[in-house]
Amino acid sequence: MSVNTPETGFRARLQRLARGTAVFAIVLSIAGFAAPSGAAAAETPSPGGDKQIVTLHVSAGLRGTIAPGASTSASLTVQNTSDSLLSAGRVRVELSRTPLADEAAIASWLDDEKAPGSFTALGSESTEPIEGGESDTTSIFVPEATIGTLAPGVYPLRAELNGATTGGPSSDDTVARDATATSVLVVTTTQTAQVGVLVPITATPADGALLTADELTALTAPEGGLTAQLDGVAGTTAVLAIDPSIPAAIRALGSSAPAQATQWLERLDDLPNSRFALQFGDADAAVQAQAKLPELLQPTTLAPFLEPTNFPLTRVPTEPTDTPNGTADPTPAPTETPALPDDEELTEVDGALPRILWPRTDVTAENLAAFAGYLGDGTTTIVSSTAVGGQNAAHATVAGQDLLVTDAASSAALSDAASEADPATRQRLLAEAAAHLYLASSKAPGTPLLIGLDRDETRSPDALREAISAADSIGFELSAVRGTKPVAAKLSTETDPAGAAELTNLLADERTLGAFASILTDPQELLSPERIEIMRVLAVGTPAEDFTEKVQTHRAQTRETLGAVSVPPSSTIQLISANTDLPIRVRNDLPWPVNVQLTVRPSDPRLDVKPLVETVVQANTTLIVKVPVSARVGSGEVDLRLGLHSPTGVVIQDGQILRVAVRADWEAIGLGILGTLIVLLIGLGVVRTVLRRRREAAEAAAAAAAGSDIDPTEAEAVRAALDPEAMEPKDGRGE
């Protein structure tokens, strides 16, 4: 993607900020005219080696403009940014009476201090000593006779500071702080052409598709970015270009939306300013047309962002049903369901003008035709004057396609002014914007002009309001400009094919992610945020130099998502049982439960495995899935090829190898040995028990015989019959 940069770019303005050693703001006022300025800064090492910096700004007129032949006053502000005391000095203000003819001459003067003609002093005044880090203001009255009669035009303005010094390590060491600064003074009569300012109203989530409740709370707080944007446009005729993702984020929260966010949305709706809707997420339509998309990208659905409990219930009548005997059941009670808004209701921009696109400037006639195909007849595209060869009439046409044209140079300067927090620096930028606007209006007197501010979500309300007020006309209406006769123009831009190629890659990744999302019960939980994030990558506010990096970052996140569900690597499993359950881990790093099918294919027939196991893995967990296996005869190592599939058969992972060491015969051998040992132990126990009981019976019989009249010889014979071992000699000898 490419962005055309006007000659008066921000880099040039930074160069002008780097000249000089004191700050002057010169405000010339006639009947309410105030003075904007230019600046220069210089760094001079002190005797002690430290840099002492004093910056100079100069400006004149009401935001750089004065009426012809009027007296005025100048306000000079000197700012000492060093740590040392800046002594008193003297400032001198000069004006060249030779006007700057074109934008190139303005750039040459502001950037290089080269201007035609000689300079005339407007006045001088002494400055007061200024402490380090402080500033001081001095006023000079400039009478009408001093300014003289100047024809309308843009004149070089210069200021010089002389005689001011800062001290060194000792009282004898001083450093001179002479400085100069440049700006312009625009002499103009009452403006007759209508000028409108287009102001983008955007807000980008830090990490995600829609703004969160916490982000909305911060942005709509009294000092928040969205509040600043509304404060800046309130009371002006600025045309608002609103990103519909902002009201969608607020409405999607329902009753849980922060109260101040809801109030912000109501305030936006109540503003009388003309408005139109940007594409969702401020996605660039040009790159989509260059990628040959059949239609503009839109969110797939916003339903996943809705929490039903945050919306009121509505009664839904239930139709009566017929019974088998032909009679109707009594009408059942109505059911209550949440009244959820649809996507159109969520993204609606109240009062928006239809069929307007504001893409980047690198559009072609083919792109314009594609835009008409996207939105239908009557589509209007906003482009920069650089896209049409410098033609800056607000309403133009190219090959039958309707255009609104913003003046590039004025838009760049005014955008910088609207983003500048320092008042003195901002006045210089406003003077520069006034110069460019004067030249633009001189090209086509009486023709409406448009200024388009850059996307910037961090502007202060004061800076934004002052920038808009410097250009907009009372009663300006964009619809009125669209109704004027267009000026024929010709496109002069070249497109960068890299942007279209990157978008093609993003959408290819999205299709892969769509197949992957079939593991979810509701695939839109993943796909809806993905689409919005792609659109935010395409945002017009993304600097061209950052676009490729954002694409690569998003594609890396997509690859990470595709790898979030997997079977992680595992060490070799020892299988010593013929029939068992094999534990296999399945990891799910997604914030939603997933439905997967685990497939297992052995590399050797000695292992029978259940080929498919269906399971549900909860969010952010690892589940151990037990797979039944049966080992046949033999032993050795078997590789199991593991895979994960969605319920629809989409391959989530394939080729993960799990090695199993099969030792199924060990179980049979072990059981045989164990069984033999058990039999031997039981047999020995039985023999010992029988022998013990015989011995006990023999002893009892002998004892009974000793206490009776039985002949001892007969008793001994009975004892021998009952316990033969008892009759054996104890020492191993016979009797």
Image (tube, helix red, strand yellow):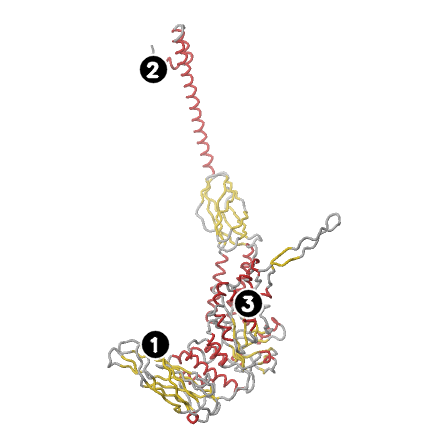
Q: Is residue 492 visible?
A: no
- Label 2 – label 3 distance at C-alpha: 110 Å
Q: Nearer the viewer, mark 2 or mark 3?
A: 3
Give the residue type that dot 3 points to. Pro
Q: Are marks 2 and 1 in contact (CB under 8 Å)?
A: no
Q: What is the secondary structure assignment of the residue under circle 1?
A: loop
Quarter in which the C terminus is drawn:
top left
Q: Which residue is mark 2?
A: 730
Mark 3 neighbour class, 10 Å CA radius: few under 14, some 14 to 19, many 20 or more: many
Q: Residue at x 49, y 58 (%)?
A: 561
> Amino acid type of disc 1?
Gly
Residue 691, how many percent across, how many down?
41, 18
Mark 2 or 3, nearer chain start: 3
Nearer to the camera, 128 or 402: 128
Classify 10 Å Cα crowding around label 1: few (below 14), some (14-19), many (20 and above).
some
Residue at the spot of label 1: 133
Residue 457 horizontal side relative to residue 403, left or right: left
652 or 530, nearer to the observer: 530
Q: Is residue 363 left or right of residue 84?
A: right
Mark 3–mark 1 Cα distance, whole angstroms, equals 43 Å
Percent position (x, y) of residue 367?
Answer: 57, 74
> Which circle, 2 or 1, is nearer the viewer?
1
Instruction: Please name the amino acid that badge 2 sits on.
Output: Lys
Could you tell me which secondary element the residue under label 2 belongs to? loop
- For residue 504, say whether it is visible: yes
Please, is residue 219 above or below residue 629 in the view?
below
User: Which residue carries the number 3 mark?
Assistant: 247
Local crowd size for mark 2, using a 10 Å CA cut-off: few (<14), some (14–19), many (≥20): few
